[in-house]
Image (spheres, rainbow, N blue to C red):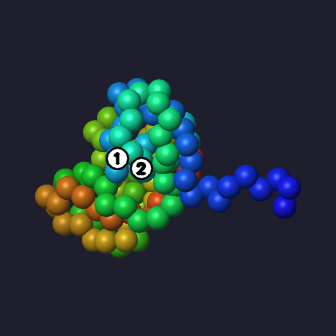
């Protein structure tokens, strides 16, 4: 195929303001992925856009397998509460999480979808 570019599992983007740490969720517009390296703001960073990652989660959320997970940028964690249209859908929980636990395993999913208004 002449027009094939890449699989799209890994994408190179400019690291957002504040830079990124390896393993951190990165949101660039509607594109979501997990940083593969630590980079300062503006530097090129490869993000992984598919797979399952253990990511920070809202400590008070009780999450069950199959719950949709949204990124709360103000608090830098995933939550099962969709919000008011500004929290992008990151993916789906593949592990349960009790209240007080601070991480959850998330399968990265559809990009660019936000919570209900």
Q: Is residue 33 left or right of residue 77?
A: right
> Disc number at residue 36?
2
Pointer 2 local density, CA inside 10 Å: few below 14, some 14–19, many at least 20: some
| Precedes in sequence: disc 2 or disc 1 | 1
Q: What's the distance in space between the residues labelled 2 and 1, CA to CA?
A: 5 Å
Residue at image x 37%, y 61%? 53
Determine whether 87 is above or below 63 in the image.
above
Nearest to the observer: residue 33 or residue 59: 33
To which residue does mark 1 refer?
22
Query: Residue 86: percent from the left, percent from the top?
Result: 46, 38
Can you name the residue that lies furthest to the right here? 2
Residue at image x 47%, y 60%? 108
Is residue 102 visible in the rendered structure shown here? yes
At mark 1, the secondary structure is loop
Pointer 1 local density, CA inside 10 Å: few below 14, some 14–19, many at least 20: some
Query: Residue 19: percent from the left, percent from the top?
Result: 37, 31
Is there a contact, CB below 8 Å, between mark 2 and mark 1?
Answer: yes
Q: What is the tally of numbered marks visible in this picture? A: 2
Nearest to the observer: residue 116 or residue 50: 50
Residue at image x 82%, y 53%? 3
Is residue 117 visible in the rendered structure shown here? no
């Amino acid at each position: 195929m002449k027009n094939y570019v890449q699989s799209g599992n890994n994408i190179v983007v400019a690291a957002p303001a504040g830079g990124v740490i390896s393993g951190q969720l990165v949101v660039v517009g509607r594109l979501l992925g997990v940083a593969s390296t630590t980079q300062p703001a503006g530097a090129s960073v490869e993000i992984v856009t598919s797979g399952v990652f253990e990511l920070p989660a809202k400590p008070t959320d009780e999450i069950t397998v199959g719950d949709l997970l949204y990124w709360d940028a103000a608090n830098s964690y995933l939550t099962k509460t969709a919000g008011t249209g500004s929290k992008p859908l990151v993916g789906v929980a593949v592990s349960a999480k009790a209240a007080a636990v601070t991480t959850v395993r998330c399968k990265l999913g559809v990009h660019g979808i936000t919570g209900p208004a």
